[in-house]
Amino acid sequence: MQRTVVWCGVRIGVRIGVVWCVSRLSCVLLHASLLPLVVLCERSCPAACRCEGKMAYCEGGAFETAPANLSAGCQGLSLRYNPLRTLPPLGFSHLPQLVWLYLDHSSVASADPLAFQGLRRLKELILSSNSLSSLPNGTFVPVPNLRTLDLSYNHLVALLPGYFTGLRKLTSLLLRSNTLATISLRSFLDCRSLEMLDLGYNRLRSLSRTTFIGLLKLNELHLEHNQLSRITLFLFPRLLSLQSLYLQWNRLRSVEQGQAFVWYTLQRLDLSGNHLQSLDPEVFRCLPNLQVLNLESNKLCNVSQEVTSSWSSVTTVSLGGNSWDCSSGLCPLVWWMRNYRGAKDSGIICSSPRGLQGERVMEAMRNSSLCEEAPTDLPTSSPHLFTSSSSSSSSSPSPLSTSPAPVLRPQPSPPLTRTPSTPPPQSPLPPPPSPPIWPIQSPPLRPSNPFPPSSSSPAFPEADFEHMSFHKIVAGGVALFLSLALILLVTYVSWRRYPGSMRQLQQRSLRRKHKRRHKRALMRQEGNLPSQLREYYLTYQSSTDTLHALVNGGCTCATISGSRECEV
């Protein structure tokens, strides 16, 4: 009976094990059969493309539209060097996850207004090196998250107001090497986040004040290789964040300031390759933070002292390739270069007179000794310290050689500098025969007198200093008030939420106060002891010899007034 039961149990166990193995094997086979289908759905790739993860590179093929069998999760697609010719409506709607799309070098000549419908996640769109001559209004409305748009090397003739509608997150716009001749009013009005705009290598002849309306965050502006003949800096007052302006290789004959304003943000200005024959000092006075200045390949003969004095913030300057006249009119530039410590082009060449042609300017002027009488320690002041009513500069260095004393500082009025009772040590200087060369500016700061006298400093810097100090005072007062309010708030919350802890803190502070009072009372009592008792409170410092004498009885003791005294 027992043998039968055991045999039945074994048969049941074997059957259960066989059923479990068969079910397990079927599950494995089912997973293996479904795996290729899943991979095919997730990573389907056309035969003429190269796929890397979620990126598809279908370059140099025969595609006229986007491949239809691409995965819907594709995030990057490159269709470079394909004969697309036109962008049909909803051509990329089956790829809603695209983040970047490259369509350059694809002979695209036209685009439908709904060509990019469904690509709301698109951030980078490259359409360069195509044949686009115009774009329908609202073409980029379906891609509101676009950050970079490249339309360079096309055939665009004009920019219409509706081209860039809806691109409020666009940061980089490249329109280089088109045939742009005009830019319509408010073309970039919706591009409020634009940081870099490239309009180089076009046919722009003029700009208006409304051309760049809305570009409050623009950092870099390229206008090189156009046909601009005149530039007024007042055209750019709304570009509050612009730091780099490139105007090289135009046809500029003059650069003017226009209306008076100060452009604090501009740091780099490139005017090389133009037809400038002179420089307006007002242009550089309104650029107090200019650091890099490029004036190469112009037609400059000399530079006035007012211009060089306004270059106080310049750290890098390029002056090569000009028609420098190595005569006395070039002395202001020579003096400035001798004292200049930044990066400069020391290889500028003389173009005239004939005897000095081909020689370096600094060596020629040093050998001819034309500019040796000017002081070498010329002061450097901030451009905003110059007044706008200063007289026109004179290129002749004769006033500097005849009266070098008033060159380093503005001429003070006699009633403010000397009292009537004290006669001057020497006769007053005669009036100069020509207008002063140096513009009015404050004297150089010295350690002994860090502030210039009020009579020689203009009113504008003081107003700026007072305005700045007032703002600092207000900011400091607000910070102090907020600090006190925070301390009071923490104290109140602690008192309301943890009353027991506050009581313990108060008790501890009271104990400390009692201990301090008790200590002070003891010190007062010790100080009020009579002189007879004070001698018994002397500090006793034991030593080995003293202890040995006391233990062995080697000291003499005597009883005086009921007290025992021992001499050690």
Image (spheres, helix red, strand yellow):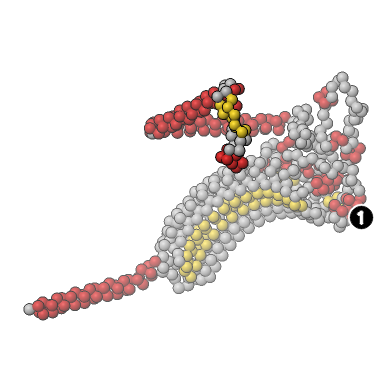
From this viewpoint, is residue 268 visible?
A: yes
Estimate the x, y position of residue 310 in percent, counting from the top left.
Answer: 75, 41
Q: Is residue 254 above or below residue 111?
A: above
Which quarter of the picture shows residue 410?
top right
The residue at 51%/65% (across/down) is: 79
Estimate the x, y position of residue 110 in percent, counting from the top left.
Answer: 52, 59
Determine whether the residue tagged by mark 1 lies in a helix, strand or loop: helix
The residue at 66%/41% (across/down) is: 264
Estimate the x, y position of residue 386 in percent, counting from the top left.
Answer: 75, 36
| Amino acid type of the residue that numbered disc 1 sits on in the rendered structure | Gly
The residue at 38%/69% (across/down) is: 39
Q: Is residue 473 above or below residue 116?
A: above
User: Viewer-proximal residue, 148 or 305?
Assistant: 305
* 70 relative to 449 in the view: left or right: left
User: Viewer-proximal residue, 196 or 138?
Assistant: 196
Query: Can you identify the residue that label 1 sits on?
Result: 355
